[in-house]
Image: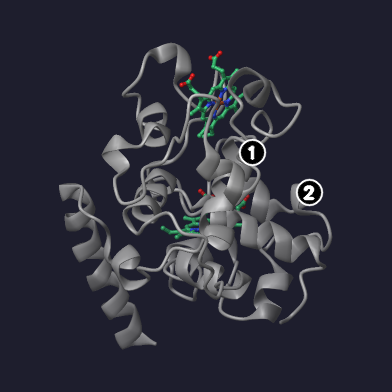
Amino acid sequence: MKSNKVKSNLSKAILAVIVGLGLPSIAEAASNKVSFKADIQPIFDEYCVSCHEPDGIGYEASGFDLSTYEGVMKGTRFGAMIVPGNPLSSNLMAVLEGRTDASIRMPHSDRREMTKLDRRILRKWIIGGATKADYEEKGAVGVIEDLCLDCHVPDGMGYEASGLDLRTYESLMKGTRHGSIIVPGDPFMSNMMVLIEGRAAGGLKMPHNDQEAPTAKDRNTLRRWINKGALNN
Ligand code: HEC
Ligand code: HEC
C-alpha cells in the first residue's frame, strides 16, 4: 500500500511537469488506444448530440449529425469535418478550439465548454486515424480507482475529511460519515455524481476542486453503472 502510494505520488509529480509543458500525459500515453464507442461517442453525447441529431437545431442548420460514427465522418452539408490523421486541418477541432469565427464556436451558445482533457482525447483519436475501432472499457471500479484513491483511503485527505473510504465496493456503498453517496438506479440523485458533475450547492467538486475534471467517458461509465443498479461486478 505504502510503496504504491509513493509510486503514484511520484507519477503525479511527473505528470504535473508534463501537463505543464502541454504534452500528452503519462496516463494517456499508457492507454494509447482510443475507442470510438467507449471514448469518443460519450464526448459527443455529452456536449453535442442534444443539437446535432436529426431534428436538433444544429443538425437542421448544418446537416451535422454527431449521434453516430457515420454521421460524424460524413460531416456537414459542406463536407467532412474530420481529416483523419490531421487534427489541425480538421474543422471539428477548429470549432472546438476557437480557431473559427466566434459565432460558430462549439458547443454552441451558452453551453458548457468542453474540458481540455476531452479535447485532447478527440485530438488523439483523430491523430490515430479517426477509426471506429473498439477496445475493452475500464469499468466503474477502474474509474474510481484512477480518480479517487489518492485521497479516499485511510490517511488520505478525502477520507480524513469525510470518512469516505473508496478501497472496496462495501466501503463505497457505505458512503461518508453522513451516509450513502450512491442511489442505485438514479445517477442524478447520487451525491457521487452531483459532486463529479459539479452540481453541488457549495461548489465543491470531486475529484477535489484543483484536480483535472474527469473525462466524459469516465462520467458516462459511472452514470451507466449506477443506472444499472450499482451492482458489485
Ligand atoms: C445548443 C445547440 C448546439 C450544440 C450543443 C452544439 N451545436 Fe454545433 N451547431 C449548432 C448550430 C445552431 C449550428 C449552425 C451554425 C450557426 O448557425 O451558428 C451548428 C453548427 C456546427 C458546425 C458547422 C459549423 C459551420 O461550418 O457552419 C459544426 C462543425 C458543429 N456545429 C460542431 C459541433 C460540435 C462538435 C458540438 C459539440 C462539441 C456542437 N456543435 C454542439 C448548434 C449546436
Ligand atoms: C485530491 C484529493 C481528492 C480526490 C482525488 C478526491 N477527493 Fe473526494 N474529498 C476530498 C476532500 C479534501 C474532501 C472533503 C471536502 C470538504 O469538505 O472540503 C472530500 C470529500 C468527498 C465527499 C464528501 C462530500 C461532502 O459533501 O461531504 C465525497 C462524496 C467524495 N469526496 C467523493 C469523491 C469521489 C467519488 C472521488 C473520485 C471521483 C473523489 N472524491 C476524489 C479529496 C479528494
Mark 1 vs mark 2, CA separation in Å: 11 Å
- Give left or right: position of 57 versus 144: right
Mark 1 residue type: Arg
Q: Secondary structure at mark 1?
A: loop
Image height of 110 relative to 11, above or below: above
- Give left or right: position of 7 versus 162: left
Residue 176: x percent and y percent? Answer: 66, 63
- Give left or right: position of 157 versus 64: left
Q: Residue at x 52, y 60 (%)?
A: 132
Image height of 210 relative to 56, above or below: below
Q: Are marks 1 and 2 in contact (CB under 8 Å)?
A: no
Q: Residue 65's image quarter?
A: top right
Mark 2 residue type: Met
Q: Residue at x 40, y 43 (%)?
A: 119
Give the labeled residue for mark 1. Answer: 199
Quadrant containing the N terminus is bottom left
Q: Residue at x 48, y 53 (%)?
A: 214
Mark 1 C-beta closer than 8 Å to ligand 2: no
Q: Residue at x 61, y 26 (%)?
A: 63
Label 2 crowd (10 A; few <14 / some 14-19 / many >=20): few
Q: Could you tell me if residue 200 is visible in this image?
A: yes
Image height of 157 relative to 138, above or below: above
Residue 187: x percent and y percent? Answer: 75, 53
- Which of pointers 1 and 2 lies earlier in the amino acid sequence? 2
